[in-house]
Image (spheres, rainbow, N blue to C red):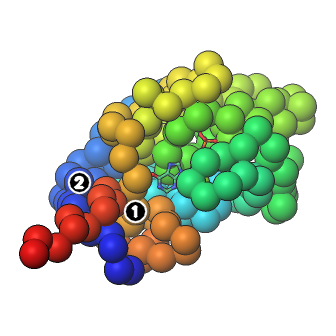
Amino acid sequence: MEGYRLNRFLSQEQIASIVQRLADQISKDYGGKELVLVCILKGAFMFLSDLVRYLKIPAQIDFVRLASYGAGMETSGIIEITKDIEIPIEGKDVLIIEDIIDSGRTLQFLKDRLSLASPRSVKICALLDKKARRQVEMEADYLGIEVDNVFIVGYGIDFDENYRHLPEIYYVTPNEPQKS
Ligand code: IMP
Ligand code: MG
C-alpha cells in the first residue's frame, strides 16, 4: 500500500509470550467452570486460535461478527450483530476475545447484549488496548499490552482487509515525503 510504512511493534516471540501469560491466567481463574470463549470476528481470529492452544482447561468456542457504521478508522456508536453466537450461554462463564479496545463502544455493546442471555459471568480478554482513546468506561479483565494512539495491523488485525495474515504486529505511519 503506497504512502504508508509498517513498523514492527511485536515479534512472533513477543506475541507468543503475551498470549501464553493470558492463557495461564485464564486457566487458573476458570478451572472447574463452564467457559465459553466468544471471539469477535474477524480481527481476533488469530489471537483466539493461539490462546486456546495454550489453555490448560476445556472451553467451548463461538464467534460473533459485528458491523459498526462510521467513517474510516473510527467506530461510530451504531453497532449491529451480523453473526450471532450459536451456543446457549445461560449460566455459563463467558469470556469475550477481542483484538483491540479503542473507544470501548464495541465491547460495551457486546457485553450488554450477551448479558441479556443470563450467563453466570461476562468478562473481557483483549490483546491490545488504546486506553487514551476511550469514550465509554470499559476495562479488559485480561489485557495483553497497552498501545499508544497508533493504527495497528497484523496478527488478524486489518487495514481495509489487508495485513491480517501477518504473524507479527505492526503500527502504520505515513511515508516521509521525498526530499528534493
Ligand atoms: P471500539 O469500539 O472503538 O473500541 O473499536 C474496536 C474495534 O475497532 C476493534 O475491534 C478493531 O476492529 C477496530 N480497531 C480499533 N483500532 C484499530 C487499529 O489500530 N487497527 C485496526 N483496527 C482497529
Ligand atoms: Mg474488531
Query: Which residue position is annotated with label 1?
Result: 153
Decide if residue 34 is on the left or right side of residue 174. right
User: Looking at the picture, how far across and down is residue 110, in whole percent?
Assistant: 75, 39
Find numbered disc 1 in the image and state the secondary structure of the residue it sits on. strand
131 relative to 48, above or below: above
The residue that appears at 42% across and 74% down in the rendered structure is 163
The circle on residue 68 is none
Query: Which residue position is annotated with label 2?
Result: 9
User: Looking at the picture, how far across and down is residue 122, in whole percent?
Assistant: 69, 30
The residue that appears at 20% across and 65% down in the rendered structure is 176
Disc 1 residue type (three-letter):
Val
Q: Nearer the viewer, residue 28 or 114?
A: 114
93 relative to 72, above or below: above
Q: Nearer the viewer, residue 119 or 43?
A: 43
Residue 127 occupies which quadrant of the picture? top left
Residue 77 appears in view: yes
1 relative to 132, above or below: below
The residue that appears at 40% across and 62% down in the rendered structure is 153
For label 1, being within 8 Å of ligand 1 is answered: yes
The residue that appears at 81% across and 44% down in the rendered structure is 78
Q: Quadrant of the N terminus?
A: bottom left
Q: N-terminal of the two: label 1 or label 2?
A: 2
User: How many neighbours does mark 2 have within 10 angstroms: few (below 14), some (14-19), or many (20 or more)?
Assistant: some
User: Looking at the picture, how far across and down is residue 150, in whole percent?
Assistant: 36, 47
User: How many neighbours does mark 1 have within 10 angstroms: few (below 14), some (14-19), or many (20 or more)?
Assistant: many
Disc 1 to disc 2, C-alpha distance: 10 Å
Tags 1 and 2 touching, CB below 8 Å: no
Q: Quadrant of the C terminus?
A: bottom left
Disc 2 residue type (three-letter):
Phe
Decide if residue 172 is on the left or right side of residue 12. right
